[in-house]
Amino acid sequence: MHLVKRLGVCFLAGFLALGCGDSGFVKARGRVIKGGEPFLADEGEGMRIVFVPLEASGTKYDTYAAAYDPYDGSFFVMGKQDKGLPPGKYRVSIELIKKKEDLLNGKLMGAKSPLTLEVTKNSKDLVIDLDQANFDKLLANAAAKPAKRGSAKRN
């Protein structure tokens, strides 16, 4: 009888552990827009999008890169080990990349970025609105000034 109880307890513990695993993480999806329309990078350009927790404490914290699709302006975040990212508030860092150079000269990186999003378990379509960051103005200013390693002019 003790064997049956032990097996029952082990089964219940295993079942609960299985259910609790990564259920708190969100495989976030969304789109990048400018002027209310999907932002489509020009040929030869790419966009690097990184989610940084706003409530990060200390010097060590996880960041979450998003995969950007330049053909439709969408993105998704698979997170560490494809688990997604934990719900919370994030600062969104953006780099517009061409020939390994950020065409924005780092103006939307880290604490400089005004872009923030809240990710919840119910997040279905996150929207990164580049107009909130004065994207056109930043891009024009960056193109007028040479980047640290060469010129960053937009064609």
Image (cartoon, rainbow, N blue to C red):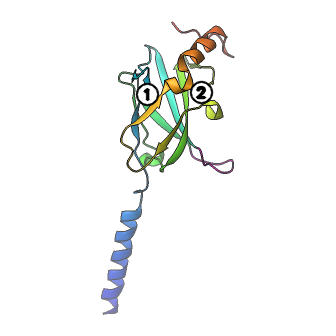
Q: Position of residue 128 (x, y in %)?
A: 46, 31
The question of residue 6 being in magenta is answered with no
Does residue 8 appear in this view?
A: yes
**Crowd rating for badge 1 (residues with CA inside 10 Å; few <14, some 14–19, many 20+):** many
Say above or below: 84 vs 128: below
Q: Which disc number belongs to residue 108?
A: 2
Q: Position of residue 109 (x, y in %)?
A: 61, 30
Question: In percent of the image, x 39 and y 57: which residue is there?
Answer: 23
Decide if residue 140 is on the left or right side of residue 65: right
Question: In percent of the image, x 36 and y 64: which residue is there?
Answer: 19
Q: How many marks?
A: 2
Residue range highlighted in magenta: 54-62
Decide if residue 101 is on the left or right side of residue 131: right
| Element marked by disc 2 | loop
- Toward the bottom, the furthest residue is 1
Question: In percent of the image, x 37 and y 65: which residue is there?
Answer: 18
Instruction: Tell me the CA gap for discs 2 and 1.
Output: 14 Å
Q: Position of residue 95 (x, y in %)?
A: 55, 25
Q: Position of residue 88 (x, y in %)?
A: 51, 49
For the N terminus, the quadrant is bottom left
Tell me the residue that label 1 is attached to. 32
Q: Earlier in the sequence, mark 2 or mark 1?
A: 1
Say above or below: 140 vs 96: above
Looking at the rendered structure, the kind of residue marked 1 is Val
Residue 17, by quadrant, is: bottom left
